[in-house]
Image (cartoon, rainbow, N blue to C red):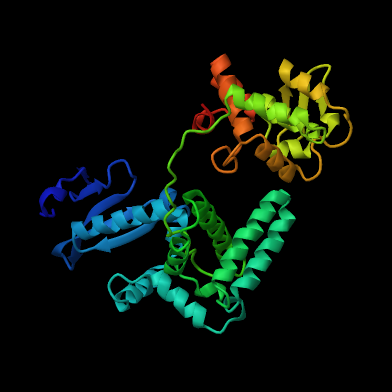
């Protein structure tokens, strides 16, 4: 029996008198002590690791080692590989693992094998690996256009990836390194942490696509190792009652601005998202039943949603002279900006972004003290994290 300090205590003995271990406990992996015999003579013990098929996913693995410590190190390595890569980890043959170890030994200390292979591939003259970044992004965007994404989502994708391509003009898609991306993002000092996070996540999504293609353009995603900027939580800004009154008063005082009243009412007194209101027509509003129906093609989450209108929301909507066609007039954003300027609201785009919807959610929760009810009105999921992060 082995004598290797604290790790020698066996779980039991085989009929032959040799010891066995389950390592780690309850893992299903067994380590068996094997007595090496030849022509009736013992030549000491070795240790056989047996990884069952239920762990590897398709076949049992047996490996033998001269010491128990080495057997346990191998077991730890196999289980860590399974945890990180799933059963794909066991796809490597023994010769492939030996080749990988040889490659590691050839690398300078601290260098990555994946980076070394990426460098090789980027300089290997294969057509798909010499593709320019601009060409790869164009192909990615063309594919995304077939996936029925919202126009707003596609516009955001084109914008962020356009900025990315401009920053790496002339580079091949396989040439971009993690350090390149880190330096690029750290140099965007004018951007907020949230914008930096959005850029990083968009680029990461693009590189995932390059890796997962049938004929990959890369073998790794360099954006995965770029840290995600931390975003400081800030209390949401909502309009006071007097501010809300001022906004609606200015809208009523100008005949042209009255066309904005339905939008203001649905945002402030029904909590609809700006994009949802922009897709609505008057056919979606039943003033008799005081109900708004947001179709799956109009809602952010693409789920049908019905919203009961409060009495004040219904009264404001009834003031509209035209109750046909789209709810919102043309040039909505510029007209809203003009209204806010005349009503003397400053920094609306920053602090008061989504202030009308945030105001509805905050006042509704304060009135009813029912997080699930308010979340349902806002079109959130069942959990309340979104509610408490963005409303008060």
Q: x and y percent of residue 2 in the render?
A: 13, 55
Q: x and y percent of residue 15 in the render?
A: 22, 46
Could you tell me how many numbered marks the image carries? 0
Vertical order, 22 against 34 (above or below): above
Q: Is residue 52 visible?
A: yes
Vertical order, 101 against 153 (above or below): below
- In this rendered view, identify the residue nearer to me: 35 or 148: 148
- In this rendered view, identify the residue nearer to me: 56 or 327: 327
Quarter of image, res 163: bottom right
Identify which residue is drawn at 12% across, 54% down. 4
Identify which residue is drawn at 45% across, 77% down. 119
Quarter of image, res 349: top right
Vertical order, 342 against 306 (above or below): below
Q: x and y percent of residue 112 in the render?
A: 36, 70
Q: x and y percent of residue 254 in the render?
A: 79, 32
Quarter of image, res 47: bottom left
Identify which residue is drawn at 56% across, 30% down. 238
Q: Residue furthest bottom?
A: 125
- In this rendered view, identify the residue nearer to me: 330 or 276: 330
Identify which residue is drawn at 88% across, 36% down. 325
- In this rendered view, identify the residue nearer to me: 288 or 338: 338
Q: Is residue 216 visible?
A: no
């Amino acid at each position: 029996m082995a004598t290797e300090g604290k790790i020698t205590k066996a779980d039991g003995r085989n009929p032959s008198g040799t010891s066995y271990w389950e390592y780690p406990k309850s893992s299903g992996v067994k380590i068996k002590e094997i007595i090496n015999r030849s022509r009736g003579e013992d030549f000491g013990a070795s240790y056989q690791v047996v990884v069952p098929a239920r762990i590897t996913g398709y076949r049992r693995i047996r490996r033998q080692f001269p010491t128990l410590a080495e057997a346990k190190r191998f077991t730890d390595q196999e289980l860590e590989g399974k945890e990180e890569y799933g059963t794909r980890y066991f796809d490597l043959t023994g010769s492939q693992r030996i080749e990988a170890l040889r490659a590691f030994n050839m690398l300078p200390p601290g260098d990555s094998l994946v980076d070394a292979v990426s460098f090789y591939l980027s300089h290997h003259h294969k057509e798909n690996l010499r593709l320019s970044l601009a060409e790869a992004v164009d192909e990615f965007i063309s594919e995304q256009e077939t996936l029925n994404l919202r126009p707003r989502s596609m516009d955001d994708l084109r914008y962020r990836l356009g900025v990315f391509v401009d920053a790496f003009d002339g580079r091949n898609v396989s040439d971009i390194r993690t350090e390149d991306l880190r330096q690029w993002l750290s140099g965007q000092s004018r951007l907020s942490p949230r914008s930096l996070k959005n850029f990083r996540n968009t680029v990461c999504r693009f590189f995932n696509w390059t890796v997962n293609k049938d004929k990959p353009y890369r073998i790794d995603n360099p954006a995965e190792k770029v840290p995600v900027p931390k975003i400081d939580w800030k209390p949401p800004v909502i309009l006071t009652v007097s501010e809300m009154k001022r906004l609606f008063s200015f809208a009523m005082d100008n005949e042209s601005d009255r066309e904005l009243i339905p939008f203001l009412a649905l945002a402030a007194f029904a909590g609809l998202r700006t994009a949802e209101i922009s897709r609505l027509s008057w056919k979606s509003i039943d003033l008799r039943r005081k109900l708004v129906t947001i179709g799956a093609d109009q809602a952010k989450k693409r789920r049908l949603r019905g919203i009961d209108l409060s009495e004040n929301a219904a009264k404001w909507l009834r003031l509209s002279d035209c109750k046909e066609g789209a709810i919102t007039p043309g040039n909505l954003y510029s007209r809203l900006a003009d209204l806010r300027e005349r009503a003397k609201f400053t920094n609306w785009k920053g602090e008061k972004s989504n202030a009308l919807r945030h105001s509805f959610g905050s006042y509704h929760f304060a009135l009813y003290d029912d997080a699930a009810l308010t979340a349902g009105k806002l079109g959130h999921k069942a959990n309340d994290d979104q509610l408490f992060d963005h409303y008060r």
